[in-house]
Image (cartoon, grey):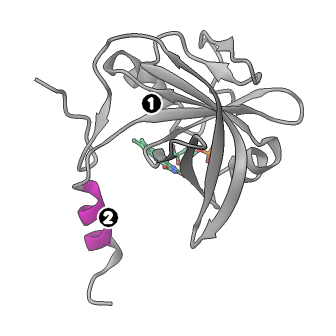
Amino acid sequence: MTFDAREFRDALGCFATGVSVITSYNQQNEPMGVTVNSFSSVSIDPPLILFSLAHNGNHCQEFKVSGKFSVNVLSTKQKELCDRFATPLEDRFNGVDYELGENGTPIFEESLSVIECENFALQEAGDHLVFICRVTNVHSKTEEKPLLFYKGGFPTLS
Ligand SMILES: Cc1cc2nc3c(=O)[nH]c(=O)nc-3n(C[C@H](O)[C@H](O)[C@H](O)COP(=O)(O)O)c2cc1C
């Protein structure tokens, strides 16, 4: 390899993405959520999406067990949720308003869209686990601007 981890991260950071919080629930039926920018569309027919979680994160194993998720696509008004679900807190849902989707996973009212899904395939990929999921329901919620992630920051669309 002619590049180091910093150069690799910097190259990846040039690809602007949206930001979403993937929610689920654990075996005690408590809500779980993690901020990700690895969400991507995969297939229209059948409807498939993917996201990846770091193996060394706290939620990778419990997400694998649950197998049901909502992808909350964040708007600029939800930056606080982005920060909250990327921070180690005792209870990330404390004080957060949410409802439950058809599959029982948390949905945030102000999300741009919500994609409910369930496990279709898991792919080990280095230090991450790729969750490929079949979409079971979609909601388009608001017309706000998307929260963007680029070069480690959150630029706004003019
Ligand atoms: C904009 C943004 C995008 C992120 N994308 C991912 C991702 O795709 N996969 C991942 O595992 N962590 C991602 N993270 C980091 C996790 O949100 C963070 O490590 C979180 O604390 C993991 O939670 P957990 O350890 O409780 O599972 C991202 C963080 C931010 C701020």
Label drawn at residue 9: 2
Which amino acid is tagged 2?
Arg
Give whichever of 25, 44 is nearer the camera.
44
Q: Position of residue 21 (x, y in %)?
A: 53, 32
**Neighbourhood count class around disc 2 (C-alpha, 10 Å): few under 14, some 14–19, many 20 upward:** few
Residue occupying the point 51% across, 41% down? 44
Query: Is 46 one of the magenta-colored residues?
Result: no
Work out whether mark 2 precedes mark 1 in sequence or the reverse, and give the earlier one. 2
Which amino acid is tagged 1?
Cys
Give the CA distance from mark 2 to mark 1: 20 Å
Magenta-highlighted residues: 6-13
Label drawn at residue 82: 1
SS class, disc 1: helix
150 left or right of 53 in image: left
Locate the N terminus and report the quarter of the image it occupies. Answer: bottom left
Residue extending furthest toward the front: 45
Give whichever of 157, 34 is nearer the camera.
157
46 left or right of 148 in image: right
When the figure is inspected, residue 3 is found, relative to residue 95, above or below; the finding is below
